Image (cartoon, coloured by chain):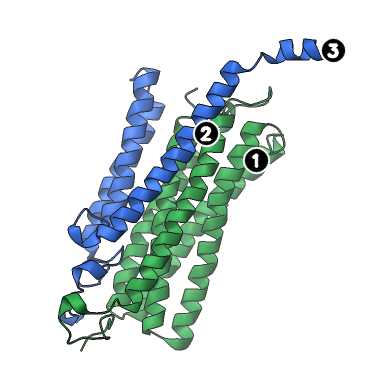
Chain colours: A green, B blue
Amino acid sequence: MSHLSIATAGEFAPARYRPATKLGVTGFGFYVYLLSDAILFSALFATFAVLKTATAGGPTARDLFELKNVGLETACLLTSSFVCGLAMQAAEARRPRELIALLGVVFLLGAGFLGLEIREFAGMIAAGAGPDRSAFLSAFFALVGAHGLHITVGLIWIGLLAAHLTTMGFSESYHRRLFCFSLFWHVLDVVWIAIFTFVYLLGVQS
Amino acid sequence: MTETVAPLPTHLRTPGTDARGSTGRWPTYAVGFALAASLTIASFALARGHWLTPASLVAALVVLAIAQMIVHLIFFLHITTAPAQKTNILALLLTLLIISLVVIGSLWIMAQLSTHMMPMDQLMQMQR
């Protein structure tokens, strides 16, 4: 008895000639979307790199960024990516309670990340270093804000996944959605690596 | 129980799954997590400490970031260079090409523009 019946169509055909599974097709399509999202982020990164020094006499990266806060954000996001992997396995083993608990942990860590980021943004805006201060800050808020927006969407998605599981239980389509979410979440973590390296760690050097 | 799932044909493999169509086992994630965490700690330690010259620090941080992205791709997204994942790798490579065109191209063009542009104060004087 297979729990994860992703190879139902043409189960008895020789492996090579089996039609692509729905999970395979959806997963690949979502992966292509994520790659296009990476291109969107690369445009924002390029903008930031060009405008990095255009501070218009305002505060620079060195004045604004606190590496301690960035370290905490990184820890939250990396751990949540790991827990998300564990959640996928709980789903494959059809353990709903464990899955809900792990999704809860992913949500809390993501919300923690978002809270730290909002606090940082609010502090900067209150100190007169909002996106309207200089081209450098506009580019910074656009890039890091776009990532934060993705995280927000991810948090809403976790809520929907939890509600879906509690009301309708496991199904093939549920697994597909959870799978797309896990890809989304892992890719956001990859984008964050680029942000903490190129924006924060390299930003405070110059 | 998941062991009974028939192996997926190699050319149909989804990014994020292994041969069984499964998303891997927890030790894989634990190894990835440990590697990623140590690379992150190394990045932050290097950026905070003053052991390297500015140029070598930039190089070190870039290398660490790329290494960590590869760790994420392999251990979390399960993208490898296996022949089974040809489509995934090709899509990834095309994306990397576009990303490098966008980033390097923008920086190049804007740097050229600012070298060839008259300094702002002279420009202002001409306009007077």
Identify residue for label 2: B106
Q: Position of residue A124 (x, y in %)?
A: 65, 38
Q: Which amino acid does label 1 sit on?
A: Gly
Mark 3 secondary-structure assignment: loop
Q: Which chain carries label 2?
A: B
Residue B128 is drawn in which quadrant?
top right
Task: Identify the residue at image location x=37%, y=63%.
Answer: A84
Asked if the residues shown at circle 1 and circle 2 are in contact, with their CB atoms under 8 angstroms apart, the answer is no
User: A79 left or right of A119?
Assistant: left
Chain under disc 1: A
The residue located at (20%, 62%) in the rendering is B84
Q: How many marks?
A: 3
Residue A194 is situated, as x and y percent measured from the top left of the image, at 43, 41
Classify 10 Å Cα crowding around label 1: few (below 14), some (14-19), many (20 and above).
some
The answer to whether residue B44 is above or below residue A110 is above
Residue matched to label 3: B128
- On the image, the x and y values in percent for residue B102 come to 48, 40
| Image quadrant where residue A2 sits | bottom left
Against A33, is B62 above or below? Answer: above
For label 1, the residue is A123
| Disc 3 residue type (three-letter) | Arg
SS at mark 1 in the image? helix
Q: B92 or A64: nearer the eye?
A: B92
On the same chain, marks 2 and 3? The answer is yes
Q: Pointer 3 and pointer 1: residues touching (CB < 8 Å)?
A: no
Does mark 1 fall on the same chain as mark 3? Answer: no
Q: In which quarter of the image is the N terminus of chain A?
A: bottom left
Query: Could you tell me residue B82's position as x and y percent?
Result: 19, 57
Q: How far apart are marks 2 and 3 (CA)?
A: 32 Å
Q: Residues within 10 Å of mark 3 (few under 14, many from 20)?
A: few
Check disc 2 and give the amino acid type.
Ser
